[in-house]
Image: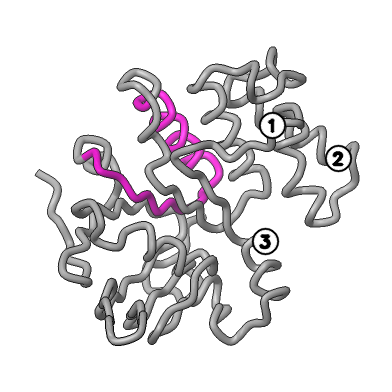
Amino acid sequence: MSKPMNSHNDIVLRASHIAKVYDEGDLKTDVLADVSFTLKRGETLAIVGASGSGKSTLLHIIGGLDTLTRGEVEVEGQNLSSLSDADRGRVRNRSMGFIYQFHHLLPEFTALENVCMPLLIRGVGIAEAERQATALLGRVGLSQRLHHKPGELSGGERQRCAVARALVTRPAVVLGDEPTGNLDESNAAQVYDLMLELNREIGTSFILVTHDNRLAARMDRTLELHNGSLVEKVHA
């Protein structure tokens, strides 16, 4: 049953007045000025903007991978800035998944082993981790590629494996940084279709940084990063 829209539990991520300033001696660069938004459970959000506008920086701050100068990020009620590195890592493992333009699969491990890793880090037993990873790899069309290493997979297969790895822990939110930017148009569309299908099935929220306005238009909302602030874009 869906939660009422005004339920506090309906908000999985809250960014409040985020600012990021790079300070190098006398040179100060304001990358993010005052960024605030909320993300509801199961919602899909695209962040667009010119190259160098700070989209990836914002995503890294949201994911607890970079520090902010001012502001707060809450993930399922946890303020990332107030946590130790170890606790922040636990929040990432429990509540977040990550997909990058380049898959970042570990080359010496098979597809199955790569997808198992977030579960093993969480403390899930090997047999159960393999069961869950096998099921999800089948869901993304890689049943015949379980024991292939990344170098033996096509670009589209590697990215589908990365999607499975991001979703295997059923996180509250998945952050994607140009997750289809390294794929041709056909493979990009297939990976997007897959992410939106799994979003509907699992209920995971997505925040995707993308330069592709056609793909952004398929998300529930689009925010444009301009001059360090976010502006809501209305889909035509």
The residue at which mark 1 appears reads as 107
Q: Closer to the N terminus: mark 2 or mark 1?
A: 1
Residue type marked 2: Glu
Q: Position of residue 151 (x, y in %)?
A: 63, 21
- Mark 3: few/some/many CA within 10 Å (<14, 14-19, 20+): some
What residue lies at 14% left-to-right and 47% top-to-bottom? 235
Which residue bears the numbered disc 2? Answer: 128
Q: How is the image coloured?
A: one colour
* Quadrant the C terminus occupies: top left
Mark pair 3, 2: CA separation: 17 Å
Q: Give the Cα separation between the discs numbered 2 and 1.
A: 23 Å
Which residue is rendered at x = 59% and y = 19% of the image?
A: 141
Say whether residue 69 is left or right of residue 217: right
Q: Which residue has dot 3 on it?
A: 94
Kindly identify the amino acid type of the residue bearing the numbered disc 1.
Pro
Q: Decide which of 99, 37 is in the foreground and name it.
A: 99
